[in-house]
Amino acid sequence: MKQLSNLDLKDKRVLVRVDFNVPLKGNTVTDDTRIVAALPTLRYILDEGATLILMSHLGRPKDAPEDKYRMGPVAKHLAELLGQEVRYLPCDSAVSPEQADFVARAPKGSVTLLENTRFDPREGKNDSEMGRLLASYADVYVNDAFGAAHRAHASTEAVAHFVKEKGAGGLLEREVNTLSQLLKEPQKPFKVIIGGAKVSDKIAVIENLLKVVDEILIGGAMAYTFFKAQGGKVGKSLVEDDKLDLALELLAQAKARGVTIRLPEDSLCASAINAGLDTAVHSSNAIPDDLMGLDAGPKAIASYQASLKEAKTVLWNGPLGVFEVPPFDTGTNAIAHSLAELDAFIVIGGGDSVAAVNAAGVADKMDHISTGGGASLELLEGQVLPGVAALG
């Protein structure tokens, strides 16, 4: 991938794929993390004397315009952050005649945000004609949308084939380099915390990481599939019964490679996922029939914290419990604060883990926080991301 610094940007029109898929409440952006993450790239391009044309998807419109998914509120918020006007025209498609004319009239040094790319059904089909039309807006194409780089869409993959000059934005480059380094030469000991509900969501990640890690700490509901596979009693805990053999196979693979898989020895349990219910701590392989494990217990938390103290590199992907509902956020919060105190390189692998470190108020203590949940998982699985490959 070409770096921004190796692109000729002066007096050029630069089309940038950003990831501005942010939550909205009415016409207000409620979390601008992804927009803020793109600012260094956008400011660099503007400082080089270029004219910016930005494109992004927002939400899940059904291949047609939907007012609640228009990019207007994002344009307004971006203008406030950049301190300059962000041109925006509500229309039916990012490549409609109206949009094309609006882009053609963009003054030198201006910023224009295209309409939602997913309003056009050709986006998700990686349509080459849509890619060609997007490319016609500019002289240079830059992809800085790591969160969408795992999707082969017209705005992330097809467009790159119709420009002579293309490269990676700073955010995309940093994400790819950081996560790739974990798979190549992480500083040891390298420990990974894998949480979440389902083993099936993380199979490929676990298998690929077994090649390089020293220890994997399992949290969340996925742990109970491992316990049941080994004959444990897990009550009403969430279990993937069709993945029991797979769980045993992962344990066997880890043992063969000399990798420790650490499971939570005890769990905070309740009869349902509701705040205010009676809770009890039980061994994770001996949970009563009427209860379910909803968070790591005190022994498990202490065990995980002790293990992490030895680490020089830590990757965290997925919470240890149902952290959205107190008191089942205890384990996740404890790990977040423990990581903040470590003398190690800490990578937060997107998704709920990002929400967890933000909620704990320790995001600034992490070395790298990924902006792409699905993209970071696929990269850690060892897959080639279409949006990255198209820049080569």
Image (cartoon, grey):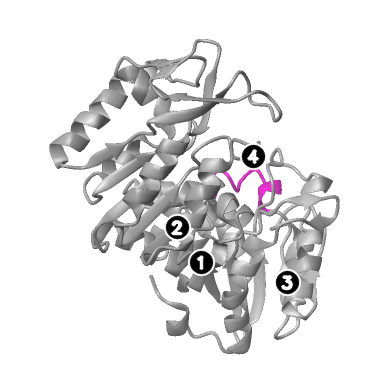
Distance between mark 4 and mark 3 Cα atoms: 37 Å
Q: Which residues are magenta?
A: 117-127
Q: Secondary structure at mark 3?
A: strand
Q: Is residue 138 visible?
A: no
Distance between mark 4 and mark 1 Cα atoms: 21 Å
Q: Nearer the viewer, residue 86 or 233?
A: 233
Whether residue 300 is situated above or below residue 22 in the rendered picture: above
Residue 370 percent coordinates (x, y): 49, 58
Q: Earlier in the sequence, mark 1 or mark 3?
A: 3
Q: Please state which amino acid type lies under the numbered disc 4.
A: Glu
Quick check: marks 4 and 1 in contact, CB under 8 Å? no
- Quadrant of the drawing holding the C terminus: bottom left
Whether residue 327 is situated above or below residue 8 in the rendered picture: above
Distance between mark 2 and mark 4 Cα atoms: 20 Å
Task: Residue 365: give its label.
Answer: 1
Whether residue 79 is situated above or below residue 67 in the rendered picture: below
Mark 4 crowdedness (10 Å alpha carbons): few <14, some 14-19, many ≥20: some
Q: Earlier in the sequence, mark 3 or mark 2?
A: 3
| Residue furthest out toward the right | 26
Task: Residue 112: give its label.
Answer: 3
Residue 33 percent coordinates (x, y): 64, 62
Q: Nearer the viewer, residue 177 or 234?
A: 234
The reply, left or right, for residue 266 in relation to residue 140 is left
Q: Nearer the viewer, residue 246 or 256?
A: 256
Task: Residue 339: give its label.
Answer: 2
Residue 180 percent coordinates (x, y): 33, 60
Q: Main secondary structure of the magenta part?
A: loop
Mark toward the viewer: 3 or 2: 2
Q: Secondary structure at mark 1?
A: helix
Distance between mark 2 and mark 1 Cα atoms: 8 Å
Task: Residue 324: give its label.
Answer: 4
Mark toward the viewer: 1 or 3: 1
